[in-house]
Structures are given as C-alpha cells and as structure tokens.
Image: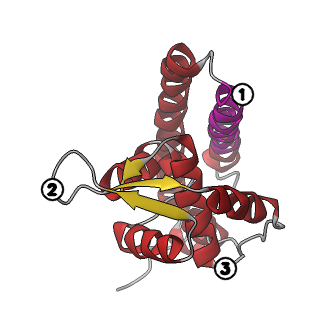
Amino acid sequence: MARSSQTQMAVLGGLSIEPMTAYALREAIRDVLGHFWSESFGQIYPTLQTLEEEGHVRRREGPRARSSVFEITGSGTARLIELLTEPIRGTPPRDGLLLRLFFGRTLGRERCRGLLEAARDTALKNLQGYESLQTQLSAQEGDTPDWPFIEVTIRAGIHHSRATIAWADESLAALGDPAGHPEPEEPQP
C-alpha cells in the first residue's frame, strides 16, 4: 500500500470518529494514533484537499474564521473500508539498536550494555504510559463501540513493551560476564 493510501486511511479513519478541523485531526493522529502511527501536517492537509476533490470528505465552515471542519461522506466511508481491507505490506526492518548490537564486538560490551539498559528504560516508560492510557481510556471510552478496537491496539503496545523488557534483561545477562572473552580495544578515532 502506497504511503498516500496509508495517509488517506489515517485521515478518513480519524474523520470516521467525528468531524474535525485539520488541526484537530493532526492533534488526534499525534495524540491517539501516535503510539503506533505518525503523519506530518504536511501530509494531512494535502490529503484532506485531495479527499475533498474526490468527494470523500466535505468541508463546512467552523465557528471561527478559517476553521473549516471536515467530515467524512458516504463515499469516504466506502473508500476507508476499501483501504482497510487491502493487504498489509510489511516494511523492511530498520532497527538502529539491533544494527549496533550486531556489530557489538567492535563497539564493546559495556557500550552494548548501555544501549540495552537505555532500551529497557524506554520500554519500561512506554509500558507505564500504555497502562496509564488503558486505564484512562477505559474510563472514558469503555462503553463505546470503539473501545474493544482501541483496547487491542493499546494491548499490542503493552505486550511489545513487556517483550522488549524481557529481551533486554536476557541480553544484559548474556553480556554480564565476559566469560573469558576479552573486551575489544576501544576504536581509535
């Protein structure tokens, strides 16, 4: 699926929840979807214009000047369903941490341990954030038809964070004792 199709999916999906301004849509994508998806304002506004030209959204004047509110149309809902049912294309992995660890012999055991500790700390903070978000949104959205779908995405973040913590702990233990393997010399600049 092309990047523009994915942006359309995020925009139409946001507007399927409620009509909103371009700014409110950007904030919703950042604050709600931002745990697993990001879009820049530079992508959102042109996509809104394209979707309006294609009849998938309609613009109405908001309460303030220059605050147009966008809402999804019937054809927009059909387009959203079409996008949501397209096969998911995997993206090639690009993990800077794993790249560094793979070449860890050159980097050195202690630096690799530092990278793993930082990854563990980040995952722990993310876990706390997801658990807090789950509690907060459960109270706000728990009775809505959207809640089961919101919760499964939050649970994915919780499981991913826990898996990262477990992996980091296991990796730190594996690097804990050099077991007779000498620490490589520090690379010369």
Q: Tell me which amino acid carries mark 1.
A: Pro
If you read the primary sequence from the N terminus, does the residue marked by circle 2 or circle 1 appear first?
A: 2
Mark 2–mark 1 CB contact (< 8 Å): no
Picture quarter with the N terminus: bottom right
Residue under the point 22% across and 45% down: 63
Q: Tell me which amino acid carries mark 3.
A: Ala
Is 64 colored magenta in this rendering? no
If you read the primary sequence from the N terminus, does the residue marked by circle 3 or circle 2 appear first?
A: 3
Q: Tell me which amino acid carries mark 2.
A: Ala
Q: Is residue 163 above or below residue 39?
A: above
Residue under the point 41% across and 76% down: 46
If you read the primary sequence from the N terminus, does the residue marked by circle 3 or circle 1 appear first?
A: 3
- The label on residue 65 is 2
Q: Is residue 36 left or right of residue 149?
A: left
Q: Which residue is mark 3?
A: 2
Is 161 colored magenta in this rendering? yes
Q: Which residue is mark 1?
A: 148
Q: Residue 167 at x, y = what percent?
A: 70, 43
Q: Which residues are magenta?
A: 145-169
Tally of numbered tags: 3
Q: Residue 169 at x, y = what percent?
A: 64, 38
Q: Few, some or many C-alpha atoms within 10 Å of disc 2 (few <14, some 14-19, many ≥20)? A: few
Q: Is residue 19 left or right of residue 183?
A: left
Q: Quick check: can you spot residue 110? A: yes
